[in-house]
Amino acid sequence: MENKDYISIGKITNFFGIKGEAKVGYDNQNQLKNAKKVILADDVSCRELDIQQVRFHKNFAIVKFAQINDINELIKYKGQRIFISKSQALNSLEKNEYLISDLTGCIVYKEDGEKIGEVVSISSNSSQDLLNIKNYLGQISLVPFVDEFFPVVDVKNKKIIIKPIEGLLS
C-alpha cells in the first residue's frame, strides 16, 4: 500500500495464543499504543480494523483487534503491514518528535545561512536517531539528531538549522 496519507507503524509477525492476538513488530511504541483504528495491508488487499488492546512484551507488541477472535482468522494477516493515517500519527508525536517522511528531503543550513546539504534518510543506533545528510559533493554525514545540534527544525518549510561542532560534518 503506497499512499502519502498513511504511514506504516508495524507488521504482524505471528499470532500470540489462540484468541486472535497478533504479535507485532513496531516502529514507534506511542503510535501503536495510541492507535484506535488501523489498516492492515499487503500488495493485494487492505482492511480497516479497530484495536481493542495493546500490550508490550520484550521487543514486540501483542495486539488484539476487535474484529478478530481466533487464531484461524488472524493467520491470513501474518506478514501484513499495519498503517495509520498521517494525521493520526502526527497527533501521537511528542514535542520535538517528527515523522521520518517529514524530515527526509529537508535542506540543512548552518546558523549563518550556509547550505550544508539535504537529509536523505534517517538511521538509528542504540542511543539516538541519526540524520543522514548528503552534501553537495555527494558525501553523507551521519549526525546525531539531538537538540544541541539542531536548534531549529521546520518540517513545513523543509528547513533544518544545524549548529555543528568541529569534525561533525567531515
Image (tube, grey):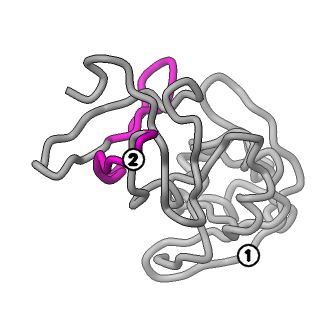
Type of residue at label 2? Tyr
1 or 2: mark nearer the eye: 2
- Residue 134's disc is none
Q: Residue at x 80, y 66 (%)?
A: 37
Q: Is 19 on the left or on the right of 149, as rendered?
A: right
Image coordinates for residue 139, horizontal then vertical, percent:
14, 42
Q: Main secondary structure of the magenta part?
A: strand
Image coordinates for residue 141, horizontal then vertical, percent:
25, 34
* Quarter of the C terminus within the rendering: top left
Q: Residue at x 63, y 68 (%)?
A: 40
For the view shown, which residue lies furthest in the bottom direction?
A: 44
* Magenta region, residue range: 111-132
Q: Is 50 on the left or on the right of 71, as rendered?
A: right
Whole-angstrom CA distance, mark 1 to mark 2, is 41 Å
Camera-side residue of 74 and 47: 47
Camera-side residue of 162 and 37: 162
- Residue 109's disc is 2
Image coordinates for residue 34, horizontal then vertical, percent:
83, 50
Q: Is residue 88 visible?
A: yes
Q: Which residue is mark 1?
A: 48
Q: Residue at x 54, y 57 (%)?
A: 78
Type of residue at label 1? Glu
The local crowd at label 1, few if under 14, some if 14 to 19, many if 20 or more residues have their Cα within 10 Å, is some
